Image: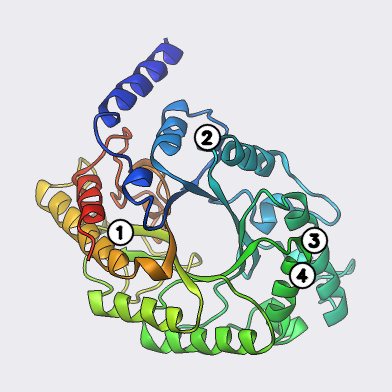
Amino acid sequence: MKTVTIISAALTLAAHLSAQPTLKDAFKDDFLIGAALNPGQFTEANPSEGDLVKQQFSSITPENCLKWENVHPAPGKYNFYLPDRYVEFGVNNHMFIIGHTLIWHNQTPDWVFQDDQGKPLTRDALLARMHDHIATVVGRYRGRIQGWDVVNEAVNEDGTMRESKWRKIIGPDFILKAYQYAHEADPAAELYYNEYSLENPNKRAGAVRLITELQAQGVKITAIGLQGHYNLDWPSEDQLSDTIATFAHLGVKVNITELDINVLPSASQNMTADVSLKYRAAAKLNPYTNGLPATLQQALAARYATLFGVFMQHRHSMERVTFWGVTDGNSWLNDWPIPGRTNYPLLFDRAGQPKPAFAAVLAAAQAKP
């Protein structure tokens, strides 16, 4: 009975969506449209969402399966079962495949930075470990994963460089080394720097310094990723437009890499996407457990229309817009920064049905500046 229900739901969804344009077709002359996938989608254990991905998106990013703690959980041990399935899904469906992410201060096991006695590694030892990881992972998917988030979130909110374990042990050139190793492993792959809150001027200035320094050292960064974890009133159109233009002026493309819109009350005044933040649950911070009011559905649609209006103005500087998730039900914002909330940040609801925001985004594709 369960199988019959799933198939029925998939057929209903397919029939509903086939009557209107798809995201990937609407923007095919402008930029790729992507989604971050969980294993149920790319293994097609969840066939309705797998079909939705195939129908709507031209690019895919893995939410977690290529992060260090999952793909390289212990010394000398690599786990490629899910990454292989992810890449196979993208290849079979002729999608532009992203690798996320090689070097990050989060979701990297402690053992990476320690020797057999639990003491911090030397610079040379950590560089060797970094090289092994990048050469093995990137090399395995050479020619199939077309672009890599090489370094993720290395800049602080004030524009200074984050004092991660990578930087403390190796030094400031750890970023340079990561790009050199990634290029060696697949010279044809696009290489990206990925970051949140670059719409804030101080942090944007720090990222500009970083990219400029890397370029001066001969690193070819194809694009910078603006994560795009936004809300209903931040960033402003001018902040977003200025940010895209600033990086385009450096000679790099701009990708929106993790787009979603938080419609719930903020737990903090900080405009951040720091995954380590956690706040205590409170009913006032989770007010829409029974559904999003119509007024907020329309506000969300208007917000997506505004954002895509900016993207379309800058479409010649952009390669890709990727949503961080496929449906509201599998968005990370249901559990960050407060676990167990009911959020509504994406274009498809928990049943995989298009929301008013979906129509607003399609309309933006037709309104070319």
Which of 275/155 is in front?
155
Q: Position of residue 194 (x, y in %)?
A: 53, 69
Q: Earlier in the sequence, mark 4 or mark 2?
A: 2
Residue tagged by mark 3? 135
Question: Label 4 amino acid?
Answer: Tyr
Residue tagged by mark 2? 40
In the rendered view, tell whether residue 368 sits above or below residue 241: above
Report the disc number at residue 181. Answer: 4
For mark 4, give the secondary structure. helix
Question: Label 2 amino acid?
Answer: Gly
**Where, by quadrant of the figure, is residue 320 drawn?**
bottom left
Marks 2 and 1 sit apart, C-alpha to C-alpha, by 23 Å
Q: Earlier in the sequence, mark 2 or mark 1?
A: 2
Marks 4 and 2 sit apart, C-alpha to C-alpha, by 31 Å
Question: Label 1 amino acid?
Answer: Ile
Q: Residue at x 41, y 17 (%)?
A: 7
